Amino acid sequence: MSFKKISSAIFVLMIFGSNMAHAGGGSGTWTVEPEGMFSPTPVLQRSCVAVRIDLTQTQALSGVRWYHNDSATVFPKIMVASGLKDYPPLYADGMVVVEDATGVEVGWSVVSFSEPVASETGSLYVIFQLPVNTEGVDVGDGPGFGYVATDNGSCVYLSSDGDDWSRLVTDYQLLVDPVYTTREPGFIALSSSQGNEGERPVILVEEVVAQTELLRPYPNPFNPQATVSFTLKTSGLARLDIYDIRGRLVKVLADEHMEAGYHSYTWLGRDRSGRRASSGVYFVRLKANNLEQIQRMTLIK
């Protein structure tokens, strides 16, 4: 294996244990067969593996699961940080969510965060800090992650110091999966603002403030259905309508008294009579708390 270089960090990868047995997670629901295990070497004081997790506006991360090699391996820290695509954050910008994390012997492991974390940029990096002066030499021995071949491109990055990152070749993917939950007001949200050219993003920590806001529909464009979410600052009557590009009412998604907080509805791409709507541009309108907000969405077929 080799790297697509994006920084000066250099790693040697130890690849071992192909043709591994089928394994499942602690809940019995995660059943992915890795093609082998991989481990970076050498492991220095702040050597890290980072995996980019993409989130929608309605999602937050409540934990992470991964295919673990050695039950004796202890990751000093698992951190999360916001960042931009192909631009992992600095080590100092990571928020520690788990300390002294361990896993099972050659199988799926999972940890839960003390509180869910959302992202204002649409991406979170989950950063595993590796135990110093260790290396994997065989299946079940030393730190390592299961991997599989992929056609979708890897979102995995390696660093010897937590600051300079190299991207893993795009035809392999580590078995590291997010545990999602629904984003709600009051969750921690990490945000990143792009600085001047050549500068790292500035990482800020914010609290999601409860306000009346119509969020962007997801996915967009969509087919055959889309999720429309919004938050209400105070309880009261709320109405959510779908209009076509000519301003004609297509569907009433909601029209009732609602409590303050987060609400989510699904449009199945059908009109009030149950007929499939034609492809094209539509508008979703929220009327609540003496406000009116509109978002654009596109139905494709």
Image (cartoon, grey):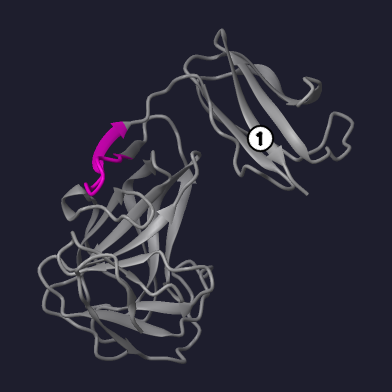
Q: Residue furthest top?
A: 290
- Residue name at image x 37 percent, y 44 percent: 116
Q: Is residue 183 above or below residue 253?
A: below
Of 106 and 183, nearer the camera is 183
- Residue type of the residue flagged with mark 1: Met
Q: Is residue 219 visible?
A: yes
Q: Which residue is mark 1?
A: 297
Quarter of the image for residue 166 reads bottom left
Horizontal side, residue 262 vs residue 247: left or right: left
- Residue name at image x 81 percent, y 21 percent: 248
Which x, y percent locates residue 3? 33, 76
Horizontal side, residue 263 vs residue 162: left or right: right
Write the start and end of the magenta stretch as one range.
Answer: 192-206
Which x, y percent locates residue 131? 16, 72
Which x, y percent locates residue 214? 55, 25
Quarter of the image for residue 37 reads bottom left
Q: Is residue 252 visible?
A: no
